[in-house]
Image: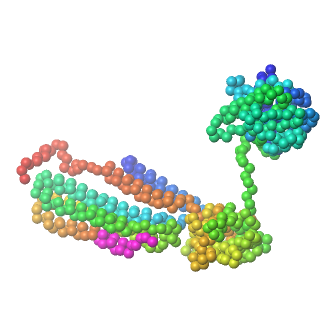
Amino acid sequence: MMNGHAILYTGVTLAFWSTITIIGICYTIFDLGFRFDVAWFLLETSPFMWALLGVGLAISLSVVGAAWGIYITGSSIIGGGVKAPRIKTKNLVSIIFCEAVAIYGIIMAIVISNMAERFTGTTPETIGARNYQAGYSMFGAGLTVGFSNLFCGICVGIVGSGAALADAQNASLFVKILIVEIFGSAIGLFGVIVAILQTSKVKMGN
Amino acid sequence: MEASKCSSKVQLLAFISFFFAFLATGSCSAQVPLLIWSSDSLPPLASPAAGHITSSDQWTAYLTSTFSSGSHTVLLFLQDKLSKDDFTVFGGVFGNKQDNVFHNLEAALQSASSSVIFQASEWLGSSAILALLQDKLDVSPLHVDPDTLAELSINTSVNNLLVISLPYCTGLHKPCKDILHGNDEIIGKVLSMVKAKNIPYTAIYTGLQPSRVISESSVLNQPAGRSLLQAPVPDVKPPIMFNVSGNPCIMLWAQNLNVSISGTLPWVDLATETPSVTKSRCSSNSSLLVLSYTSGYTLSFYMSQRFYPGSARNWFTLDMVQLQYKDLTGVFLGSRDISAPAEYSYHCSFVSSVEEPLLVPNNSDNKNTSQWMLNFVDFQIQGFGLANGTNFSYASDCAGFFSPGIWMGLVTGLIMLLILVYGLHMITHLNTMDRFDDPNGPLISVPQTE
């Protein structure tokens, strides 16, 4: 028998997909499929919603990645440091690599949020293509930097944890493992660069 | 005793009249009670049977016979609304004599030399009784205030008609009971003043209109049993139709077709006028509805229909709305929103160029027409595919099930819910390490030095 969590998640997923399926079948039977209009959804929802979702996701996903990495590395350093106290100071660099990921996130969040400007316009025609492009670009950039930093943080954290434990066994191993960590840290930077490219042409306003 | 007979009569009447009203065949007739009492003698009248509705001929004949000769001073107490039910509810007839608000009225009826009560006289209109009395007494009515009556001198050798207006419950400030009690006090005050002046009088207490109307439906027409009491639904006007060889080809219905030529003049509602549709034309892929009004306005609706490969069906769009007035033409482009599949009609609560604009004015280069505005309310149009007689096809509405705001709220809400659930999942799966637990092994020793 599954545990409580599995039952709950299965139930919610089943309810969600069955609702969608039944509504879709009803619309199809009554020849109302034309009412399912993705273009209407993308044009009627405000660009501000997308832009600010991007900002929120940029910082929050980055912080999740950093936090996850730090807790993985941190517990290993502290655990290893019990028997080999000399590793404590050297392995803080792994923590700093994880923290850098959070800093990328907050910088991008501030950069993206500064691009959100006021515009007058309530209908798709009066809002204009440029504002829609701005909104979606900011959402995309936020998503990019957020998810890149999330996985980068986890990666650096696990590698850092391994580094700490290896260092506790044999001090010469630390420098070699640090190279692996640097490669892991680079992928977070890629996310930041792509996000900057995505928002380079953003101009919101009238 | 007159009082107990009156109250028990009202009680009995209330029960029997409701029973009879349910079975009575006849149209819905409104009735108002008519109470007449006099210090002189009134012509005798056989008491009507319970539930009997005195027809207008009967009570007009009775009043005519009463005032045919001699000079009378008539006090007409006209309450805004009066029904038999007011006496039932507020007359203390269910054994609660102390709640009776009609003390003075009862006392007057008891002490009068003669009195006649029509519990339900057929109501002909709010000015019927006044007009009748005016006619019979041949004197114009004098509306008096009970406070000023004391100073009024009444000449008893001629006919006098004094009208005292009494309010009915509005439900706003005072409860109904207090208002009717106030009316009763006014009746008492007026009667005591008239008695003090020793003037022979005839008093009539009735209502301008009934306060409650129970519709009596014929058993033959409707099945007996419970039915919904609903206000009569006003007739809906038919849509504007352009017919080709007998069948409608274009149909338009709108509650209001408001147009504005200048900001200072009020909006003109073209839907109140009848247009001529002769200049319209109808074909398989383009339709034009031209409404020519006698007031000088001409409203044209340009529609087109074609096949769209993306969705693989035919769609029709309202491309343009043109307003012409006195050789000036204002053009309003329909945005792509005014569209529907070609088999269906398009309906929208508001189609306007001002608030939530679906029609974009294209007049900025012409200074005469740049101020023109359109506002159509409850608008439904169909230009193609009319095969269902004079009915519109299914109406594809401009408003969907969820508004854009609801969608935005759902998206952000669901994202946050997802994050919350994920976070809670992680927290509930936190574990402490138990890899090196060895309950039987040696305890951990922590060296004090590095």
On the question of residue B46 being in view, the answer is: no
**In this rendering, would A74 be left or right of B210?**
left
Q: Residue A168 sits in which quadrant? A: bottom left
Residue A5 position within the rendered picture, expressed as x and y whole percent measured from the top left? 38, 50
Q: Residue at x 76, y 70 (%)?
A: B294
Q: Residue A84 sits in which quadrant? A: bottom left
Q: Residue furthest top?
A: B1
Q: Residue furthest left?
A: B449
Up-down: is B413 above or below B183?
A: below
Image mark count: 0
Q: Quadrant of the N terminus of chain B?
A: top right
| A8 or A115: nearer the viewer | A115
Residue B3 position within the rendered picture, expressed as x and y whole percent measured from the top left? 78, 23
Residue B179 position within the rendered picture, expressed as x and y whole percent measured from the top left? 68, 35
Q: Is residue A193 magenta?
A: yes
| A55 or A125: nearer the viewer | A125
Which stretch appears magenta?
A190-206
**In this rendering, would A24 be left or right of B89?**
left
On the question of residue B377 being in view, the answer is: yes
| A88 or B142: nearer the viewer | B142
Q: Residue at x 14, y 64 (%)?
A: A174
**In this rendering, would A44 be left or right of B297?**
left
Q: Residue B154 sits in which quadrant? A: top right
Q: Residue at x 26, y 63 (%)?
A: A103
| A150 or B288: nearer the viewer | B288
Q: Residue furthest right?
A: B69
Residue B69 position within the rendered picture, expressed as x and y whole percent measured from the top left? 93, 34
Q: Residue at x 48, y 72 (%)?
A: A128
Q: Is residue A143 magenta?
A: no
Identify the image's colour scheme: rainbow, by chain, secondary structure or one colour. Answer: rainbow
